[in-house]
Image (cartoon, coloured by chain):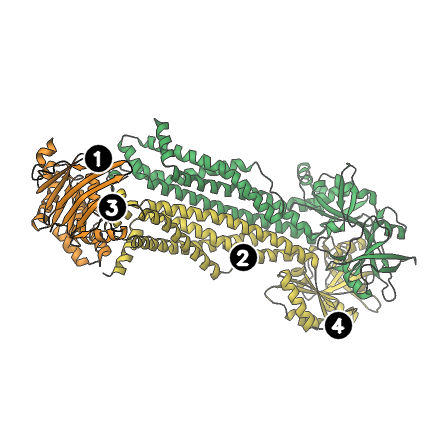
Chain colours: A green, B orange, C yellow
Amino acid sequence: MFWQMLKGALVRQNRKMFMVAVTIALGVSLTTAMLNVMLDVGDKVNRELKAYGANIVVTPRAASVLREIYGLENSSVGAGQYLQESDVGKLKTIFWSNNIVAFAPSLETQVAVGPGNANVVMVGTWFTRQLELPTGETVETGIKQLKSWWTVEGNWVKDTSVDEAMVGTVLAGKLNIKPGDKMEVSLPDGLRQTVRVQGVFNSGGAEDEQIFVTLPFIQKSLHLGGKVSKIDVSAITTPENELARKAAHDPKSLSLKDWETWYCTAYVSSISYQIEEAVSGSRAKPVRQVAESEGTILQKTQLLMMLITILSLAGSALGISNLLTANMMERSREFGLLKALGATDGDVLLLTLTEIGLTGLVGGVAGYFLGLGFAQIIGQNVFGSAVAINVMVIPWVFVSVILITLVGSFPAIRMLLALRPAAVLHGR
Amino acid sequence: MSLLELQDVSMIYGNVKALQEIDLTVQQGEWLALMGPSGSGKTTLMNIIGCMDKASSGSIMLDGVDFSGVTARNLTMLRRDKIGLVFQQFHLVPYLTAVENIMVAQYYHSMPDEEEALAALDRVGLKERARHLPSQLSGGEQQRVCIARALINYPMLILADEPTGNLDETNAKLVLEFFQQLHREGHTIIMVTHDPRVAELAERCVVLEHGRIINRKDQRMVCREEAIS
Amino acid sequence: MTKQSMYFTMIWHALLRRRSRMFIALLAVAIGATVLSGLVTIYYDVPRQMGQEFRSYGANLLLLPIGDQPVLAETQMISAVRLLPPDKLIGIAPYLYDHIKVNEQPLLVAGTRFEAVKKVSPYWQIRGTWPAEDSEEIVLGAEVAERLQIEPGQLVTLAAADSDGDKKVKVAGIVKTGGSEENFVFVDLSLLQQLLHKEGMISVAQASITANETELTTWTQTIEQQVPGVAPRLVKQVTQSEHTVLGKLQALVYLVTIVVLLLTLICVATTMMAVVTERRKEIGLKKALGAENRSIILEFLGEGLALGTLGGLMGTVLGFFFAQGVSINVFGRGISFQPLIALLALFVSIGVTGLACLIPVKIATDVEPAIVLRGE
């Protein structure tokens, strides 16, 4: 009989319960979408922040190369030590290789370009080089990936070329150079080389006064085959905390357990440490300007998302519970009748809860899949990539649906139990 | 001229013939009782007379005006102006006081007038309960408020659908006494009932069965016997 | 009593004497308005707030001397700065670059104002302390300190590259950034200008301003026109990336807001519909009493508008407090009240509630009163 009544209730009331199911579905879909997005947003924003360029700089341990800023004189090029170009690929063999998004080795020198331009920096590097890793995969990386904010008039240099070059917009302006021109540069030892300018780039920074050539070209010119003086790395990192800072200062000061935690978390300091392990004779330092800011922005974004999620969840929970209560109130006559016919409070309660439960279940399942759809819409439209579907979300959603429907029905049920059948049946 | 004249009125819902060829005349000042078993069509007939429904065929004249072909909107206006309704389930607006409930009827008709409404309540003996909500009134008191409301716009015709059906003995008696007074005052009353004691207060009795009037010949004071049989 | 006052009496009592039902409806509207007002405020505020966070990346605007000049006058820098909005300017740090000898070693030196540097380049990590104000204390870059084996607190001798006398100064702190700063010695600007006899001169000024790319471009153009001698340049690495990332964040909040709004609107609508449907008998009664459909619709509309207004007001206030809470917890800053958003939330609440009332009422008034009054 119970099932008959239940069936009757559901079938007759189907329009109203349908509305309730739809609302629950929407609430659940919102919860699912928000939770999935919230759990993934950190990763996504992190990738976006990679636009800021290198956050780790790798240099030879013993070198102290002084670099100049804004076209000033350089007192001396540091003597001696370099890194091996063949070691660069090892960056993608460390524990955190998947977090290494882009990297570019470089070697620089000062050249003279005609009279009055005695101290122009010429940098040899990878532009968008295909690198074969020891693991067998190929990866494409270089300053094109690293310095995403560069705009180029003309073309990028091909890494396979011999004497192609790119000139910074400020320098090009001074020397009146356009893409397609040839340029003569004089190296420190007096040797003269000619380069073909492929493009003029705008970086909005110090590089605008520099010339960029391929790494082999400059290595040949300086007789430093297979050597590089620095590697810029852009890695996805976890924001630093106390542990990370302590480790950054001196890894050996950590306890074994702490050390493992630190090593196995993608802090910029632990990635730097692992790079030092992989690339011989190197020192890897976080570029604080980029690393710290990234961390802060990431944290704030995640916190913001979390708070918005809470608001929307609260809003939808309250909305649904409200609807349930209104729905119950609408049916007070029906319940009064049941009670008058001899149903106990327990009977009415059971019937109601089962009804709500079934509706909630149907709505919940539909809502979950709808929510995954929403999450993907958000992911594609905002970040241009799919949002990772987190299976952990399912139990959370399940629990919240149950909670919402229970809490939502609470005022209504309380009202139901307080109903006096006579009052209801006689239209009071 | 008769106040109400129905000629050959039928009401068909799909396949169901709720009313068939009803001829009925009601004079001013008459108290007519409508009787019959459930499903006989008496409620349908009441609804048609009360301008709450339109007949499928036939003519209905109220006060010389034929309203069988009238639009729904005009039906509403007719109902408002000429008919007072009293239901079995005393329908009052639950969140308005007794006097406010009466003023609602005035409001839709013309203008709310608190003094008149209070006077109406006084006539049904409920002046002190004017500011009470329906939930604070007994069944009988609520019904009396309904009667006061039905009268407020000086209707030509009072339709009552089992007005004592939901009342206990005492209250029923009170309400019926009031109807008797109304009758004495010259109001025209059509009342649906299946309580013979109620029916016998009426002057005339029409019995319906399967949508037809079965006592065309003799409609006077035979209600008691009809009711028993 | 007039017809109008009766109208209001009916609406008033409908709302007041049916407290529990109306409370539920009110709650639904208030929730909707809260979410709307809160999220929309956050949406408009995120670029401003996050934008300020992005200032931690450092300078986004440089003021350079034009052409091949090595230096520009500090007064020119000040004129240029005057053209920038003071409330958005985080800081402006002048730099004078040259050579200097520290303990007889030739090194690069930068003269600057440390208070300004703290604001413009918050990512500097100082071991030791920042130089005390108005002192002659200096800061060494980490590479330099390592080479010279100097610790904070030690004294060093400072001498101009081509000159005569020298000065003994204390090293207040050592700066670590992983960038080019580590190769410099930092000295107070006035002190350096004095030592080098380059009073009033600077090589470049770094500015950190909260602004988007278009605003920055406009200001650079203004400065170019109005302060000859100063060549302003955007630091594209910073401005462009900021532009991209902020854009994505805003788009994210926008989409989320839309989804949430849709949901709460539906909840409000269905709740209102349920509440109105409950009163079908009352509608039938009124029709029986001679009310025209229009009258009944107007009555319910009146109730809906009253609910929408009250709920809207509550929600707008609550939403503002929510956004304020978020702002303080996430960014550590408050927000100012936005009357436009409040009005928007209010109007949307009224509109939605009114509509959500209308639909079921329209359906109910189409039903013949006889059917309703006979009971279910």
Amino acid under disc 3: Lys
Circle count: 4
- Distance between the Cα atoms at labels 2 and 1? 66 Å
Q: Nearer the viewer, residue A340 or C210?
A: A340
Q: Is residue A285 above or below residue C193?
A: above
Q: Nearer the viewer, residue A184 or A123?
A: A184
Q: Indicate the secondary structure of the residue bearing disc 2.
A: helix
- Distance between the Cα atoms at labels 4 and 1? 111 Å
Point out which mark residue B54 bears. 3
The reply to whether callout 3 and callout 2 are in contact (CB within 8 Å) is no
The residue that mark 4 highlights is C199
Amino acid under disc 4: Glu
- Of badges 3 and 2, the one in the foreground is 3
The residue that mark 2 highlights is C44
- Distance between the Cα atoms at labels 3 and 1? 18 Å
Residue A163: give x, y in percent of width and height.
86, 53
The residue that mark 1 highlights is B39
Residue A250 in sight from this viewpoint: no
Residue A98: give x, y in percent of width and height.
70, 41
| Left or right of B42, for residue A375 | right
| Left or right of A314, for residue C72 | right
- Distance between the Cα atoms at labels 3 and 2? 58 Å
**Chain of residue at mark 1:** B
Q: How many neighbours does mark 1 have within 10 angstroms: few (below 14), some (14-19), or many (20 or more)?
A: few
